[in-house]
Each structure stands twice: as structure tokens, then as C-alpha cells.
Amino acid sequence: MPVPPFETARLLIRPLAMDDLEAIHQILDVDLSTADFGSEGAQSRDDRAHWLQWTIMSYAEQVKLYQPPYGERAVVLKQTGELIGAIGYVPCLAPFEQLPGLDPQGVPAPGRPFTTEFGLFYALAPAHHRRGYATEAARAMIDYAFRQLRLKRIVATTTYDNAASIGVMRKLGMRIEKNPFPDPPWLQVVGVLENG
């Protein structure tokens, strides 16, 4: 089932469209060029256009394959129609069981096998930080994931020094788990929210 557009008090969360290229490129590749999204970093406009085409096509293809609705969506101010960021569901593959709260035996250890988790991604233009938009958009996505997709839990990941993202996780009621081990270096902080 495709993810429908969501409306919150101040936001519209909708599928991305090719008309969003300039705005999403500006946000993800210029304004947030130094942000650590756990990917390849800032992209050229042409590379972002290719990514956007792939993202748009994936909405329908995932439905055809009965797959989870992974992929980014636009975060838009309802009052002005301005695209201010992206939010979406992402597959997360990491050794989550080496985190204290996710280890079934309660004894975290380095080198645990990798497992998959259903993740939440969000990135907003810096001009729109500290206004509660990320939390508002994430709440709508979490509500859909728990009510419609009937997920057991959802996670979000970030770096040790990203206080703003950790703050969003806390406002969402996520339990904050920190990797007590140096490896893998990209698995640092995980917010975990259980359904129910």
C-alpha cells in the first residue's frame, strides 16, 4: 500500500516530485553538505536528479513487490508551500545487538551479527531548525508506521555530537542507546521506539 500524504498542524508530508529537485538539492547537498547522513555525502545536481528519479519510481515499485514503503518524502510548510526538508523510512543494517538495550541476553559485546531494523530518516533546512518541525513530521511518520504498517519498533540513528537529532529522538519518546564500542564507527547513537 502506498504511503498517503500526511497533514499535521503545520506541515504536509508528501511524495517527492521532479519539481522538487532544486529545493531538495539545495537542502541536502548545499545547506547540509557537511551533515553526516551515513551515505556518500553531498551530491552534484545531476546526481541528486538521478536519486530523485529513483526515489519517485521506487514508490510504485515497492508497492508492486509488497515491500515496505522505504524512501524519502517532502516536508512542506502548509502555510507557504515551501519544501523545508525530507523525511522517510529507511532500512537499517547494523550490529544492533551490541547495543545494551537491544542485546537479547543483556550482555552487549563487540562483533555481533548484523540485523535489520526499520529506520526513520529526517533532514531539515538549517533555516527551519529549532521550530519543532522535525519532531512534528517524525510523529506523523511514526504514527503511520505503528498504526498502518503495524511495526514492532522503529529506530533512528545519528552521531554522538548531533545534539539536535538526539533531542528530536527524546521528544518522540525514543530510548537512546549509545554504542559502547568503537566499531563500527558509523553506529554511534540509536533512538529506539517500541510500538505500544
Image: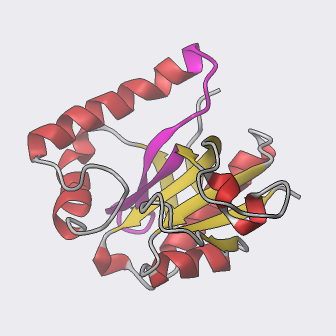
Q: Relative to residue 184, is residue 102 drawn left or right?
A: right
| Place of residue 43 in the rendered image (x, y in percent of width and height, measured from the top left) | 16, 49
| Place of residue 78 in the rendered image (x, y in percent of width and height, measured from the top left) | 45, 63
For image coordinates 79% across by 64% down, the residue present is: 107
Q: Quadrant of the C terminus?
A: bottom right
Picture quadrant where residue 104 is located? bottom right
Asked whether residue 103 is in view, the answer is: yes
Q: Relative to residue 107, is residue 1 drawn left or right?
A: left
- Relative depth, front residue between 171 and 154: 154
Seen in the picture, residue 64 relative to 56 is either above or below; the reply is: above
For image coordinates 64% across by 49% down, the residue present is: 112
Q: Quadrant of the N terminus?
A: top right
Picture quadrant where residue 117 is located? top right
- Relative depth, front residue between 117 and 151: 117
- Relative depth, front residue between 108 and 115: 108
**Extreme top residue here?**
64
Q: Relative to residue 144, is residue 165 drawn left or right?
A: left
| Place of residue 125 in the rendered image (x, y in percent of width and height, measured from the top left) | 31, 70
Q: Relative to residue 95, is residue 60 drawn left or right?
A: left
**Extreme right residue here?**
196
- Image: magenta residue range: 63-90
